[in-house]
Image (tube, rainbow, N blue to C red):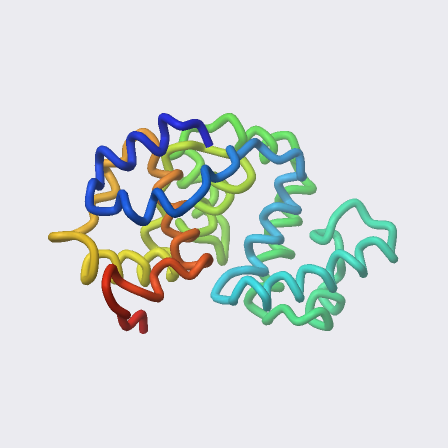
């Protein structure tokens, strides 16, 4: 992550400088070559699950995909998706999206070149997919630099902790423009690396 991203965050949120300085620069995101249908499958798997649970289920899917010598997990049959641990709702989402993708893969691969509002509209138009789905695709697969997933459960939790223990008022993501993706990634990192388990000079309650 280029240094100017960190500089912008420090300038926008001076009260978070102490937390930011504890983190080494995060690696810069790069667009992923994964087919969009596979990226969507991974995102759907992760909906409303912990990272560990999502990784476990996706590993089962990937193992079955490889044993069946398929192009991607989205090509697995409905029964296979269920056996690997997907809920019926998620199975429907994956299968319906896969059917659309197979009819015109190029139009979905072109999502990479859409601006963020266009991408959000395109993704949210599919059954079982939401703004959160669009945000995950935009950040982790298309490497878009200015996305803040306001509906993400972890970010909601971190935002509350920061507002209650570090900031003087509400966190305003728009202050981080045009690097709101960097803000989100640092917020995830604050929690993942345990920096929010303690407040300056004492412990804080994070639940």
Residue at x 25% of width, y 43% of height: 173
The relative height of residue 112 versus residue 73 in the rendered view (above or below) is above
Q: Decide if residue 85 is on the left or right side of residue 182.
A: right
**What residue do we see at 49% from left, 58% from top?**
128
* Image x and y of residue 90, in percent: 57, 64
Percent coordinates x, y for residue 56 in the rendering: 66, 66
Whole-percent x and y of residue 131?
40, 49
The C terminus is located in which quarter?
Answer: bottom left
Residue 39 visible somewhere in the drawing: yes
Tell me how many marks there are. Answer: 0
Q: Judge whether 136 appears above or below 198 on screen.
A: above
For the point 70% across and 65% down, which residue is it?
81
Q: Nearer the viewer, residue 39 or 188?
A: 188
Which residue is at the front of the view, 37 or 5? Answer: 5
Residue with the most extreme left position: 168
Query: In the rendered view, does 184 fall on the left or right side of 13?
Result: right
Residue 117 can be seen in this image: no
| Residue displayed at 80% across by 55% down | 65
Q: Is residue 94 above or below residue 112?
A: below
User: Residue 70: percent from the left, percent from the top?
Assistant: 82, 49
Which quadrant holds residue 4? top left
């Amino acid at each position: 992550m280029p240094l100017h991203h960190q500089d912008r965050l420090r300038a926008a949120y001076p009260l978070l400088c102490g937390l930011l300085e504890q983190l080494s620069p995060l690696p810069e995101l790069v667009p992923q070559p994964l087919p969009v249908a596979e990226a969507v499958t991974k995102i759907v798997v992760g909906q409303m699950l912990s990272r560990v649970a999502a990784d476990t289920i996706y590993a089962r899917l990937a193992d079955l995909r490889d044993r069946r010598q398929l192009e991607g997990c989205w090509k697995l049959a409905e029964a296979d998706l269920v056996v690997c641990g997907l809920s019926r709702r998620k199975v429907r989402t994956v299968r319906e999206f896969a059917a659309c993708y197979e009819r015109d893969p190029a139009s979905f691969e072109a999502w990479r070149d859409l601006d963020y509002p266009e991408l959000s509209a395109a993704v949210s138009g599919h059954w079982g997919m939401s703004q959160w789905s669009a945000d995950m695709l935009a950040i982790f697969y298309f490497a878009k630099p200015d996305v803040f997933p306001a509906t993400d459960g972890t970010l909601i939790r971190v935002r509350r902790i920061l507002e209650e223990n570090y900031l003087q008022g509400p966190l305003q993501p728009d202050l981080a423009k045009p690097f709101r993706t960097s803000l989100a990634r640092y917020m995830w990192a604050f929690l993942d690396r345990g920096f929010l388990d303690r407040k300056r000079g004492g412990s804080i309650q994070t639940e």
